[in-house]
Amino acid sequence: METKIPEWFLSFYERLLAAQLRAVRQIKSPRSKKTKPEAGKGISNMDMALDILRRAHVRSISPRSLPRLKPNMAWSWIGSP
């Protein structure tokens, strides 16, 4: 007697194994991290403020508080206004 395995189960298992293989490959050879700023050159005050807000998980910022940034750049990291 032959046991028939459903096609949906085989597809599911194939995707599961593919995801596990990707995870193992990422652990095995991680991507290089962002490069640090050049020596003697720190981050700007605006970059520092945005970094603090990102770390605090601030989700709503008035557009008037970010006048120097382009609208699409200002909202790209926090979602749409």
Image (spheres, rainbow, N blue to C red):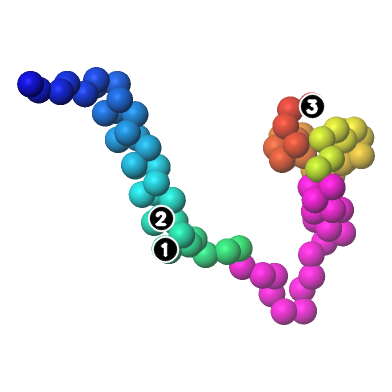
Along the polypeptide, which appears first: circle 1 or circle 3?
A: 1
Quadrant location, the C terminus: top right
Q: Which residue range is magenta in the image?
A: 35-56
Vertical relation: 38 (above or below) 75: below
- Label 3: few (<14), some (14–19) or many (≥20) C-alpha neighbours in 10 Å: few
Q: Which residue is mark 1?
A: 28
Residue 79 can be seen, yes or no:
yes
Tell me: 25 left or right of 60.
left
**31 is within the stretch colored magenta:** no
Disc 2 is placed on an element classified as: helix
Q: Are marks 3 and 2 in contact (CB under 8 Å)?
A: no
The residue that mark 3 highlights is 81
User: Mark 2 belongs to which amino acid?
Assistant: Val
Q: Residue 49: image x %, image y %?
A: 86, 53
Relative image position of residue 6 (x, y in whole percent): 24, 20
Q: CA distance from mark 3 to mark 2?
A: 37 Å
Around disc 1, counting alpha carbons within 10 Å, would you say few (fewer than 14), some (14 to 19), or many (20 or more)? few
Q: Which SS class for mark 3?
A: loop
| Furthest residue toward front | 1
Whole-number angstrom distance, CA of label 2 to CA of label 1: 6 Å
- Compare residues 69 and 43 and report the one nearer the observer: 43
- Residue shown at 34%/29% (left/top)? 12
Q: Residue at x 34, y 42 (%)?
A: 18
Image quarter (top left, top right, bottom left or bottom right) of the N terminus: top left
Check disc 3 and give the amino acid type: Pro
Mark toward the viewer: 1 or 3: 1
Q: Which residue is mark 2?
A: 24
Report if residue 54 lies within the magenta region.
yes
